[in-house]
Amino acid sequence: MPVEDVYTNAFDASRVAWVETGVSPYLHDTNIDWIGTNIANVEEGDWAFPVSAGSDAINSVKVRLENYVTALGCGLVRVYVWNGAIWSLAGSVGGASLVYAWEEIDVSAILNTWAKINAAKVYLKYARLLNGSQYVRRLTRKVDYTPAAGVVLRRLLVGVGL
């Protein structure tokens, strides 16, 4: 089963209430670009992703964030996902690590077609519970899919030089 894990490649600044550090889109694959906040209920987004190369049967779709907090339990990041038609609260991450750590949310029910996967956007909202800050530095969309039998056979034949 192929897995496509792609970093965000676009930030449209529809919501800009967090502190942005580095170069847009801030949550691509670097250690020096990130966003952070300690203010309750502020939003940041919207991030988009490259068009998927996947096809055929979708097994699962996940949104992954690399994040940390300055005080355990200080708050959560609520993750909202756009499927091309509506925004949905996908879930919450964060609050449990004092160093950058990956967390993921299964969004298979929200992004259940290739059209929705390709239209996907994400924005974040900080749900502050205690004193402390939340930081995020990476965002990916991970799709696990099963190609049609003909595609698998063609890949096998190409792989053995036939």
Image: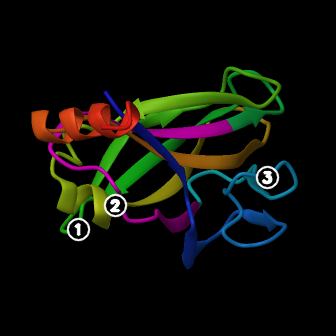
Contact between marks 1 and 2 (CB within 8 A): the answer is: yes
Q: Is residue 60 visible?
A: no
**Which residue carries the number 3 mark?**
30
Query: Quadrant location of the C terminus?
Result: top left
Q: What whole-number distance in Å separates the C-alpha atoms at marks 1 and 3?
A: 28 Å
Picture quadrant where residue 118 is located: bottom left
Q: Residue 141: x, y in percent?
A: 45, 47
Tell me: residue 62, above or below residue 28: above
> Distance of mark 2 from mark 3, alpha carbons?
22 Å
User: Which label lies toward us, 2 or 3?
Assistant: 3
Please give the residue where the numbered disc 2 appears in the rendered image: 120
Out of 154 and 40, give the one closest to the viewer.
Answer: 154
Q: Say left or right for 162 vs 137.
A: left
- The kind of secondary structure element at disc 3 is loop
Q: Position of residue 66 (x, y in %)?
A: 66, 37
Tell me the kind of residue under disc 2: Ala
In the image, which residues are magenta?
43-66
Check disc 1 and report the residue beneath it: 84
Per the rendering, the mark at residue 71 is: none
Query: Disc 1 vs disc 3: which is toward the camera?
Result: 3
* Residue in the picture at 71% in, 63% down: 26
